[in-house]
Amino acid sequence: MARETTIRGDDAFGDEDDDENSQDPSSEFSAGGGFETSEADDELRPSRLEDVIGQADVVERIRILLQAARKRGEPLGHLLLDGPPGLGKTTLAMVIPKELGTDFQITSGPSLSAPKDLLPYLTNASEGSVLFIDEIHRLPPAVEEFIYPAMEDFRVDITLGDGLNARTINMKLKPFTVIGATTRSGMLTAPLRDRFVSREHLTFYDQSELATIVRKNAAKLRSPLDDEAAVEIALRSRGTPRKANNWLRWARDYADARADGAITLKVTHAALRMKAVDKLGLEEIDRRYLETIITVFSGGPAGVQAIAHTMNIPSDTLEDEIEPYLLRQGLLQRTPRGRMLTAKAFEHLGRTPPDRPNNDDKNPGEQQDLF
Ligand code: ADP
């Protein structure tokens, strides 16, 4: 039997403190090209599974889930998608109901501050529809408890009133699918994680996949794009389609403003240089992170909280948006004692590692060959 979760009548339906969604400081942060979702994302989002580039294994498994659900006439099992920002979690979640021909609702963990915020989504969920919860690791515990019976038995238990007058309403829901997205699957509680039938991890894209995305999207935007420029944008997009799209748009603006509208290799170089995107796709903020570890922590090991305080950036932002690509690029190591830079990071920044004899660091301002 699923555990009963109650929400107090007043709390559940009172219109007092219809509070603003508690804003995460990190969600306001954008590392130049930006990790924020926007309408721009929607314009370039693939709408069918066959248009989704890359993530071949994940897509194939989702295809099987869809076929099985269709054959049995049952809703898809709850699905958890995890991976760094901008890799396609929302995209996949939106494609699924389109493929199934069912409804789609979207919300996010931080915007659901109490069970009453979740209730309308649950009662509105039509049969077989998808409820997408972004940043599901940030669901408050009370909301999380409330969603358990909804996911397990398609039921919610609502307590109205107090004391002797209290009564519980048991509300049946239509069978529906929760798709959760998270950049931190490790922060999910075990009971919530266990309620997802399938879990998929999205990884960074390779260069040729990103170049394909860039080419397709340039065509969607009706912008002439040289092949070399597509490859260059792909190279500097940190393995992330959202970045690739953002750089494509920027190169397009640059081409329109400073050239004849064609996105050539020369235009792309000039545009990305203006944004201080280096050969590895690192931006100002990434380099500041590496420089902080070098100058303040002698190359590490350093705790993420200490680095976050020094940089005045939320540690969540460092962990979700900055570190994954640096780790993947072999510029950074996570050790039990903290973050450490690798020799490759020192080399990339034109610095001498501290344990080398001739420790005369070059001025970081002189890093011409970075770009
Ligand atoms: P996330 O939810 O993981 O932060 P999104 O799904 O919002 O990422 O993806 C950001 C943008 O990147 C989308 O608007 C879409 O245009 C593009 N994108 C993501 N994944 C793919 C993909 N596999 N193929 C093509 N474009 C993609």
Image (cartoon, rainbow, N blue to C red):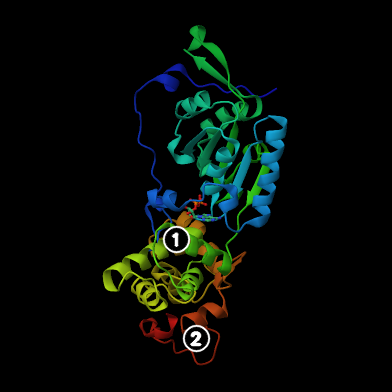
Q: Which of 170 and 34 is in front in this view?
A: 34
Depicted 246 relative to depicted 369: above or below:
above
Q: Is residue 58 left or right of residue 10?
A: right
Q: Badge 2: how crowded within 10 Å, few (<14), some, or many (20+)?
A: some
Q: Which one is closest to the eye, mark 1 or mark 2? A: 1
Tag of residue 219: 1
Helix, strand or loop at disc 1?
A: helix
Amino acid type shown at disc 1: Ala
* Residue at image coords 50%, 60%: 241
Q: Which of marks 1 and 2 is nearer the N terminus?
A: 1
Q: Which residue lies furthest to the top in this view?
A: 164
Mark 1 to mark 2 CA distance (whole Å): 44 Å
Tag of residue 286: none
Location of residue 187 in the rendering, given as x and y in whole percent from the top left corner = 58, 47
Count of numbered badges drawn on the protein = 2
Amino acid type shown at disc 2: Thr
Location of residue 205 in the rendering, given as x and y in whole percent from the top left corner = 57, 63
